[in-house]
Image: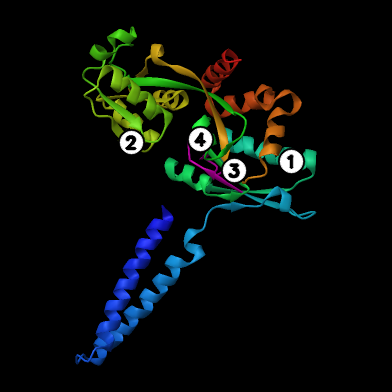
Amino acid sequence: MFKAAALFIVNKIVVYKVVINKVATSKVAISKAVRNKLAFSQAILSLLLLFAISPLAATSDRGDLYQELQPGQRAQLTVLYVPAEGFAYTNLQGELTGVSVEIIRDFANWLQQQHNLRLQLNFVAETDWQRFYQRIVQAQGGVFGLGNVTITEPRKQELAFSPPYLHNIAALISHQDIPALPAWPAFSEHFAALQPLAFSGTLHEQRINRLRDQYQPNALVYQVSSNPELLTKVASGQYYAYVDAYNYWRAREAGMPLRDHPIAAETGETFGFIMPHNNDWASLLEAFFSADGGYLNSARYRQLLTEQLGPELAQLLLTSKEGEK
């Protein structure tokens, strides 16, 4: 995609340079001031052309490779994250924290204690989920992504996953005035006044598309690009959507007029950190998750979920994990 865009820019710049050169070198009488402007334009276009074909225009996120570390060297790892309350957010003290952030910090501490490796975690925020995903796909070396990405086989073709760090529940939600869906056959009538809504590029979009195809084949699926936008639209009373349980739970706590429909809840999903395939820290990350009986079975993990998500939501997610064993 980038190569195509760069080629388009290069072609346009070349065309403009040819036109300017023809005018500047023609025998048509033009003023000195105009010639100076043309010369300035040529210089600017030359710089743009240099940038368009420069490797700097195609830079990707990078981090140190484990196999290339020198003795005593502090590894520089890049950690991209999508800001999300409870998982990767800035608290009232101005500190970056959250379940995902603290787990990756625990990994860094474990590496220092168990392997005498010193790490510098360089956190970088990316608010657009789809751009975040593509940045990890295109990254080089020691780069990690924290974005509550569901582990799937198709995605494994594009990037590498850590072991699961969370067992998710997908909740079907609507405005709170809509009664709970009593049974699937009642779906068409129950949601007749609502439009399907989906977060683009996620598994929730696939779920909504399946519901639409089965129960509302003539309906248009409206798209959003963030969870806050999705929750706001559903709270307006015009839409229904799938969302991760923790997002629904927090929206309810914040007073948004939403309800879930338990009959449509889906479990069995797990979230993992994502990495480019050339990230050679993956085996160490696997060892970290499996050490001492498993990180997800540890008191530290339960403490993190409770502190960051609240005791009720933490228990719900932990129960979901136990139910999938």
- Location of residue 233 in the rendering, given as x and y in whole percent from the top left corner: 29, 30
Q: Relative to 192, is 279 above or below?
A: below
Magenta span: 78-95
List the residue tagged with mark 1.
111
Residue drawn at point x = 68 percent, y = 27 percent: 295
- Location of residue 137 in the rendering, given as x and y in whole percent from the top left corner: 52, 45
Q: Main secondary structure of the magenta part?
A: loop
Circle 3: residue type: His
Label 1 sits on a secondary structure element that is: helix
Residue positioned most to the left: 29
List the residue tagged with mark 4.
155
Picture quarter containing residue 196? top left
Label 4 sits on a secondary structure element that is: helix
Residue 81 can be seen in this image:
yes
In the rendered view, does 46 fall on the left or right side of 109? Answer: left
- For the residues labelled 1 and 2, the Cα–Cα distance comes to 39 Å
Q: Relative to 68, is 206 above or below?
A: above
| Mark 3 or mark 1, earlier in chain | 1
Residue 109 is one of the magenta-drawn residues: no
Residue drawn at point x = 45 percent, y = 23 percent: 245
Circle 4: residue type: Arg
- For the residues labelled 4 and 2, the Cα–Cα distance comes to 21 Å
Which quarter shows the C terminus? top right
| Mark 3 or mark 4, earlier in chain | 4
Picture quarter containing residue 48? bottom left
Graded by Cα atoms within 10 Å as few (under 14), some (14 to 19) or many (20 or more), the crowding at tag 4 reads some
Mark number for residue 224? 2
Q: Are marks 3 and 4 in contact (CB under 8 Å)?
A: no
| Mark 4 or mark 2, earlier in chain | 4
User: Mark 4, mark 2: which one is toward the viewer?
Assistant: 4
